[in-house]
Image: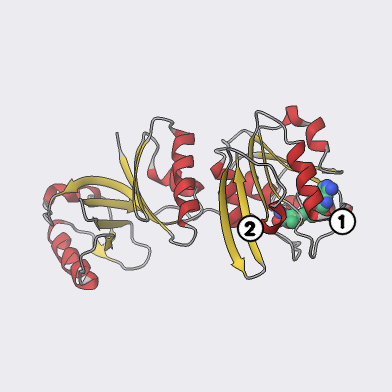
Amino acid sequence: MPESFFVLSKDNLNLATDEIIAISKMYDRFSKIKVISNLVIIQSKTNWSKISNRATFVKVSGQILRKMSGLFLDEGNFEILKNAKSFVCRIINISSNQFNVPELENSMGDMISKFSHAKVKLVNPDITVYLIFTDKENFFGFSKRIKEEVRPKKIKKYPHELDWKLTRVMINLIGLKKGEIICDPFCGTGTTLLEAESMGIHAIGIDFDKKMCEITKENLKINKYKSEIINSDFQEMVKISEKYDGIVTDLPYGRSSKASEKPEEILKRFISILPKRKKIAIMYKKELESNLKLKGLKKYEIYRHKSLTRTILIK
Ligand SMILES: C[S@@+](CC[C@H](N)C(=O)[O-])C[C@H]1O[C@@H](n2cnc3c(N)ncnc32)[C@H](O)[C@@H]1O
């Protein structure tokens, strides 16, 4: 079974690691995963680029060609460069050893040039060849140039909108698949709806503020997305629960956005009516949770600044 590697951003590493695991399990529940610091090795029938495309915090990824005991390369390794016009070599060092990385990359490039007609190109080459060093084992891998995903456009913004990366990571953590339906009962400017649609997941947004519903509609329209908007209190999510597979939402924080009641009351009322048997990812300001009875849920905390730490809960 093919093996892929993913080097994750070290900011929010827990979140990034769990996200990549959730995506690989969503595509192939038998995938085998090994985590070495911010390097994740996945054995799965899913191609590395498919996993990488869905992920938020992957810095570098590719396919592993083989494990190596030392730094031994031969002609057989360079089959991948057969039809390539350009390549670059990159060293990823997760080990405790120190290497002169530029020197090693240069000498590897020289070595490859002897076997292949491809020329070194530092920016946007056809193939990137990787040598990955860890304390236990070393890997030889590669990645091909992949088409950058087109990001959804947002023409109307608002101060309380959520960063698209945190929204995407929440969708991925609950493993919603292409073709499934998501509900955001506090949809605001529609970040969840845009992000979901960009992954082929249909969405239903609810917001009690008519102005927010109008903003979301415009943001959907510019992207030609067809998600549904309901101008109502979030309780509507209970009535329409047959229509969706999961909830991803970011609750009111008590500043900049309108709220029907105190944010802590909203959070309490929301938790008490959460539909059963649905995948759920919710975000709220950490200080609001003091009286909540929450058990058996996976929790992440994201520090933003001294007066805002966000909590993400996953069910
Ligand atoms: C933190 S904002 C959501 C931001 C959104 N994730 C975005 O990126 O634009 C919370 C939203 O909840 C809405 N809201 C407040 N009380 C509500 C209620 N009782 N029912 C539904 N929506 C409500 C507000 O109008 C606001 O748009």
| Quarter assignment of residue 246 | top right
Q: Confirm or reject: label 2 Cβ below 8 Å from ligand 1.
A: no
Element on which disc 1 rests: helix
In this orientation, which residue lies closer to the viewer: 5 or 111? Answer: 5
Relative to 276, residue 8 above or below: below
- Residue type beneath disc 2: Arg
Residue 224's x, y, as percent?
71, 48
Which is more N-terminal, label 2 or label 1?
A: 1
Residue 275's x, y, as percent?
72, 32
Element on which disc 2 rests: strand
Point 45% across, 46% down: residue: 20
Point 81% across, 42% down: residue: 234
- Residue type beneath disc 1: Lys
Q: Which mark is residue 136?
A: none
Residue 287's x, y, as percent?
69, 58
**For the residues marked 1 and 2, what is the alpha-carbon distance in whole angstroms?**
25 Å
Is disc 1 surrounded by few (<14), some (14 to 19) or many (20+) residues within 10 Å?
A: few
Question: In the picture provided, is 203 more to the left or to the right than 77?
Answer: right
Dot 2 corresponds to which residue?
Answer: 310
Q: Is residue 218 visible?
A: no
Is disc 2 surrounded by few (<14), some (14 to 19) or many (20+) residues within 10 Å?
A: many
Point 82% across, 31% down: residue: 239
In this orientation, which residue lies closer to the viewer: 149 or 190? Answer: 190
Question: In the picture provided, is 97 more to the left or to the right than 34?
Answer: left
Point 64% across, 54% down: residue: 152
Dot 1 corresponds to which residue?
Answer: 211
